[in-house]
Amino acid sequence: MLRQLTGNVRWLAEPYRPTRAHGPGDHDDGGLDEALQREVRDAAYQAVMDYRAGRLSPEPLTPQQITEMLAIALAEEIPPDYGPLLAEEFGLWTRQIPTAAQQEAPEDFHVLIIGCGVSGISAAVALKAAGIPYTILEKNSAIGGTWLENVYPGCGADTPSHLYSYSFALKPNWSHYFAKREEILDYLQGIVDEHAIVDRVIFDTEVVRATYIEDRQAW
């Protein structure tokens, strides 16, 4: 983080290089002594405050820089081919993969998405970006899927919040490392609102069977 915000490569060199983790522990100290930990944390705090105040304008990381930083953080070699993939997942690159269609899509081509949960919302955003019309059938009366239905006490993600986010809609201000149901549902609702997805959703409609019609190549 210090390398990214400040642009200073000294944070990637000794004596700040963390050691490799052994076992399932968090390895929060990175194998650094207390004095170095204090120096790094103080510098990180100042960098974050400067960034939030507009005093730092970091340049976007290149795929090569990402793999270099990750290799140092994990204390192991990271294949350079991971760079472009990580750049996409970090939201630094837009995933724009050209699709070579074998035939022209008919004018009435329309995609049906079953469910307006995490996967359905992602599919809707991708289809909209590709200019493909779609409709979502949702059995509930609101969006959210699992995060709408599960209401038990303490319901939340067991994946770190920053990883449980769309690469096209990163959220830097999650309130908890493991977000609770309400915040995740609010995040999903924000994506739906931003992309006007709700206009394409038919609620209270459950799909119980689908039959493929071969000669029409449609369901």
Image: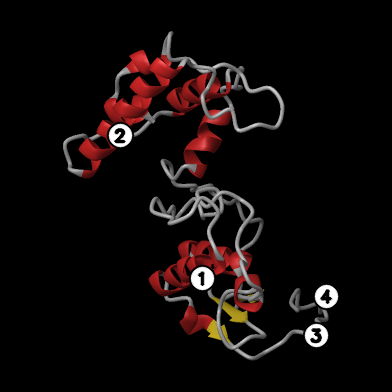
Residue receiving disc 4: 214
- Asked whether residue 105 is in view, the answer is no
Say which quadrant the N terminus sits in: top left
Label placed on residue 208: 3
Residue most extreme to the front:
34
Residue depicted at 29% across the width and 23% down the height: 7
Residue depicted at 33% across the width and 30% down the height: 44
Residue depicted at 58% across the width and 51% down the height: 99
**Does dot 2 land on a helix, a strand or a loop?**
helix
Dot 4 surroundings within 10 Å: few (below 14), some, or many (20 or more)? few
Q: Amino acid at mark 2?
A: Tyr
Q: Amino acid at mark 4?
A: Glu
Q: Earlier in the sequence, mark 1 or mark 3?
A: 1
Q: Which quadrant holds residue 116?
A: bottom right
Q: Amino acid at mark 1?
A: Glu
Residue receiving disc 1: 182
Front: mark 1 or 4: 1
> What whole-number distance in Å separates the C-alpha atoms at marks 2 and 4?
61 Å
The answer to whether mark 2 and mark 3 are in CB contact below 8 A is no
